[in-house]
Amino acid sequence: MNHKRRIGFDRRFEQLDAFVEKRSGYERRDFIRHRQVLIAKLKNTKLFGNMDNDQLMRLLLIASKVELEQGDILMKAGDEVDGMYAVLDGRLRVECRNNILATLTPVSFAGELEIVTGNVRMATVIAESDCRLMCFSVGELDAVFEKDRDLYSIFLAGMISDVSKKLGSLNQTIARIKNTVNL
């Protein structure tokens, strides 16, 4: 099984502007439309929903693209934290001790809780299909949040909302597993 492959996005506004300016009118419109669609998808999540477009762009500029093939392992329980991931396309399976805890679909997040806690990975995440993800690395996030404490506060508030939703779902999964074991 392969491990994740990273493909870097442009990381600075100047590089991004230069990239867009060098494109033909059609390519430029396509790039801008793609960026607007991505921002709209992220704004529909609990984690990024309260951010304005400029704040989201700052985060998108530090993101790297990760591609997985079916069966690839994104992270293993016990791994050190390298970042958090947003699912753009495909499905990821979250497992712990051979129990399926969740299936992540677009636009879900994996590894976001460990960003805040600093703990090792709590679960193993495996691609159920070919996937396209965005990775927000710990170092890059720390650098952005150090410069923009308001953005960090908004991120934490979104994290709390996202994690509480996941905990409710996880409690249901644990109850289902306990019922299966007790049969």
Image (cartoon, helix red, strand yellow):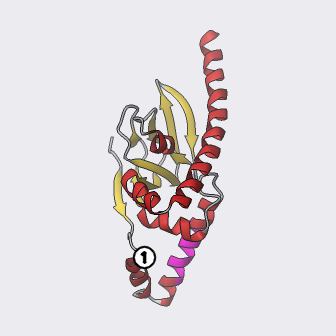
On screen, residue 27 above or below 107: below
Q: Is residue 140 visible?
A: yes
Relative depth, front residue between 84 and 174: 84
Q: Quadrant of the N terminus?
A: top left
Residue 79, position in %: x, y?
35, 36
Residue 25, position in %: x, y?
50, 89
Q: Residue at x 54, y 83 (%)?
A: 29
The secondary element bearing badge 1 is classed as helix
Relative depth, front residue between 17 and 183: 17
Question: Going by the picture, which residue comes out furthest to the top?
Answer: 183
Residue 80, position in %: x, y?
35, 39
Quadrant in the rendering for residue 151: bottom right
The residue to which callout 1 is attached is 13
Q: Principal SS element in the magenta part? A: helix
Q: Residue at x 65, y 16 (%)?
A: 179
> Magenta includes 63?
no
Q: Which residues are magenta?
A: 29-38
